[in-house]
Every structure is written in structure tokens, then in C-alpha cells.
Image (tube, grey):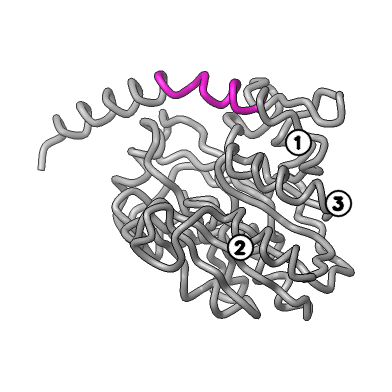
Amino acid sequence: MFKIVKRRELNPTVTELAIEAPLIAKKAKAGQFIIVRAGEDSARIPLTIAGTDPEAGTVTIIFQVVGGGTLELNALAEGECVHDFVGPLGKATEIEGLKNVCVVGGGVGCAIALPVARALHEQGTKVTGIIGFRNKDLVILEDEFRACCDELILVTDDGSYGTKGLVTMPLEEKINAGADFDEVIAIGPLVMMKFVVKTTKPHNVKTVVSMNPIMVDGTGMCGGCRLTVGGKTMFACVDGPDFDGFEVDFDEAMKRGSMYRQAEAEDREAECNLLNKKPE
């Protein structure tokens, strides 16, 4: 059992948990993930590690309530325990030797982008952060990004906070202005990453994307995160989650990702009903 030592609501649908897991905290690197189960009979949930504190022995995860598994996880209070917490899994983001990087995060994907930005900052890389949200109420981790970015640009779809627009707009402006990025690292919804690649590809700026959004089981056995990269079949959880954005078939990935939406909604509704029936 793994104790929840800190809980924080980042916005109405996104929660941050710091969980006691000293062995994982010592080994985990930016870009890797864990698999968590709230209870013995709960669904397995792959979540990218948002941060670690090796001295305290804690691992931070950030998740959005989508299906029944995340609803169960969200119902746990500080001091309670999750049943399973396994990792670190997946390949760490490759950052060695990079001198000038733009990290682009969208929505809850910013939770995955943040440890990458931190790792880059700690090795002395110049980091430009571009983070985007639908509106002001959904903004998360702004202060944390400011602490590890040489420049941070925040955009919202409706203009209620920061600059109005999409993340691709300031990205293209920076490239056209001669930013000369070694690499762009994009993490967020599939459609966002698709258009980030459409922005960088004409300029031949290497772009790495994280395919965490399509992971289901996290072990390569379910096949739910199968995708085509450079004409070859790969699995986000065991071959990634990071891939060359120029080679990813995003249309196929988005079609696959949408397959589970109805099941997630039904699972969430069923779990809500069970939680509501539990005695106070």
C-alpha cells in the first residue's frame, strides 16, 4: 500500500497527489510513467510522473477525472493509500546535449511537460515554455513553469487569461523571429500535438511528441496504444511514450483514442453511482 501524503486540487477536474514511493522516487526520470490502482478491484491507470522528491521518498502524479478508475482515485483523501503503484516505466525523455528547447504543453498535458522543462532547466538548457488552456479556470502549474522557464508564454482559447489564441501561434512567431530551437517538445491533446508538428515541420525543427494520451494498460499487452510511426507499428507504453512527431500518424492515433470515450463515460457514471451509495 502506498500512502497519499499530499493532495491538491489544481482545477475543478484535475488533482495532484504526492504518494509515498521511495524506490520509484530514486529511479524515476522525466518522461517516465507509473501504473496506479486506487483499490484492489480498480482499473489500472498509466500516469506520467509529474515530479519526485527522492529525499522525502515521494512521487507526484497529476490526473484528470475521465473514467471510473480516475474517479476512484480522486475519491481518496490525504492519509489514505492507493493499492498499487508500479514504476518507473517507459523511456525517459532524451534531453542530453540540448541547448535551446521550446516545451509546449496543452491542458492536463502540462503535468507531463513540467518535469521535462525542469530537467532541461537543471542541466542548463535555455527553456521557452508555451502552455495553453481553454480558459482561465483550467490553468494549472503556472508558477511551477515560470520557475523553470527562461520565458513563459501562456495562452487561452477564449482570451480570459494570458494571450488569446492557440499554442501554435506564439510557437510560429518564435520560429519566424529566429529562435533557433534545437528541439520542440510537445505534450498535450493529440490534436494539439498534430498541429504543433504542422507548425514546426515546414521549418524543419525537430519535434518530439508524447503519446501518453492513448495509453490504456501500460504494458503493451492490450494493444490500445498501438500507433504507426514512420510506417511501422509501435506501442506508446513500451516503445515510447516519446516519438518523432514528423513520423507519427496522428489521424490514426486520434481515431484509436476516441474508441474509449463512451466506455469511459459509462464507467464513470457507474462508479459515481457506487460512490453515492456508500455510507457517510
Q: Of label 2 and label 3, which has the lower sequence position?
A: 2
Left or right: 167 as drawn, with respect to 78: right
- Mark 3 residue element: loop
Q: Which residue is mark 3?
A: 204
**Amino acid of disc 2:** Pro
**Range drawn in magenta:** 253-262
Residue 178 horizontal/vertical position (percent) = 79, 70
Residue at 60 percent of width and 27 percent of height: 254
**Amino acid of disc 1:** Val
Residue 122 horizontal/vertical position (percent) = 72, 78
Callout 2 environment at 10 Å: few (<14), some (14 to 19), or many (20+)?
Answer: some
In magenta segment, residue 4: no
Residue at 37 percent of width and 66 percent of height: 161
Separation of residues labelled 2 and 3 (CA atoms): 17 Å
Q: Which residue is mark 1?
A: 238
Q: Quadrant of residue 266?
A: top left
Residue at 58 percent of width and 44 percent of height: 192
Separation of residues labelled 1 and 3 (CA atoms): 27 Å
**Amino acid of disc 3:** Asn
Position above or below: 270 against 145: above
Position above or below: 200 against 38: below
User: The C terminus is located in which quarter?
Assistant: top left
Q: Which residue is mark 2?
A: 170
Residue sitting nearer the eye, 4 or 138: 138
Residues at badges 1 and 3 in contact (C-beta under 8 Å)? no
Residue 272 horizontal/vertical position (percent) = 24, 31
Q: Is residue 220 visible?
A: yes
